[in-house]
Image (cartoon, rainbow, N blue to C red):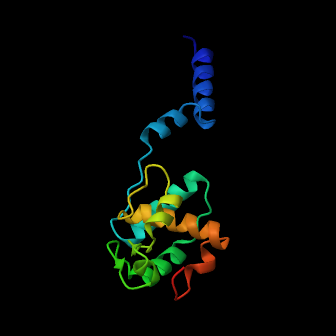
């Protein structure tokens, strides 16, 4: 190959790389799957990702964390056996203290375990968005929602 042809080939490759034609495939192949911590911050971040992927309104992490602390003190295994829901036979359960019928209505496919803190957040956020206009409208209250 003569010098001009090699230069033209290099320029074509450089142009393709700069335009993303070559690197796009490499970057996609090397993209890491996100990992989340097994704690309140990690559960919230994962739930936010799921909500965003589904096209739901995604509240700030601080709002979700505040509600989780009000509802269960951050305990994903919490059960409320004393309020009106419990007296009616449907105690509030999990991190965000949802009752089973509400959880079942607002859970997303593949996220149907009320005891999974991420699933519980997803359903609770979707419920609050639908019922109160946005999760943030109830996030910082001190009473149940």
Does 24 sit above or below residue 81? above
Q: Nearer the viewer, residue 51 or 15?
A: 51
How many numbered badges does the structure rendering display?
0
Q: Quadrant of the N terminus?
A: top right
Residue at figure coordinates x 41%, y 71% from the top left: 41
Name the spot of residue 34 as percent of width and height, x first: 42, 53
Does 45 sit above or below residue 87? above
Farthest residue in the front direction? 88
Residue at figure coordinates x 44%, y 37% from the top left: 29
On the image, which quarter does residue 115 sit in? bottom left
Q: Nearer the viewer, residue 125 or 83?
A: 83
Residue at figure coordinates x 54%, y 36% from the top left: 24
Q: Quadrant of the C terminus?
A: bottom right
Name the spot of residue 45 as percent of width and height, x first: 46, 64
Farthest residue in the top direction? 1
Q: Nearer the viewer, residue 37 or 2?
A: 37
On the image, which quarter does residue 129 sit in? bottom right
Q: Nearer the viewer, residue 6 or 44?
A: 44
Q: Is residue 78 left or right of residue 14?
A: left
Name the spot of residue 47 as percent of width and height, x first: 47, 61
Residue at figure coordinates x 47%, y 59% from the top left: 104
Does 53 sit above or below residue 6? below
Name the spot of residue 76 as percent of width and height, x first: 35, 72
Farthest residue in the bottom direction? 142
């Amino acid at each position: 190959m003569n010098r001009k042809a090699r230069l033209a080939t290099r320029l074509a490759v450089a142009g393709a790389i700069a335009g993303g034609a070559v690197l796009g495939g490499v970057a996609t192949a090397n993209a890491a799957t996100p990992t989340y911590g097994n704690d309140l911050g990690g559960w919230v971040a994962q739930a936010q990702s799921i909500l965003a992927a589904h096209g739901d309104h995604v509240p700030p992490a601080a709002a979700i964390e505040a509600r989780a602390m009000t509802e269960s003190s951050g305990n994903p295994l919490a059960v409320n056996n004393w309020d009106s829901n419990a007296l009616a036979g449907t105690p509030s359960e999990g991190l965000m203290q949802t009752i089973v019928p509400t959880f079942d209505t607002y859970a997303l496919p593949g996220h149907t375990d009320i005891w999974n803190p991420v699933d519980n957040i997803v359903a609770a956020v979707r419920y609050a968005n639908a019922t109160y206009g946005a999760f943030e409208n109830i996030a910082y209250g001190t009473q149940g929602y």
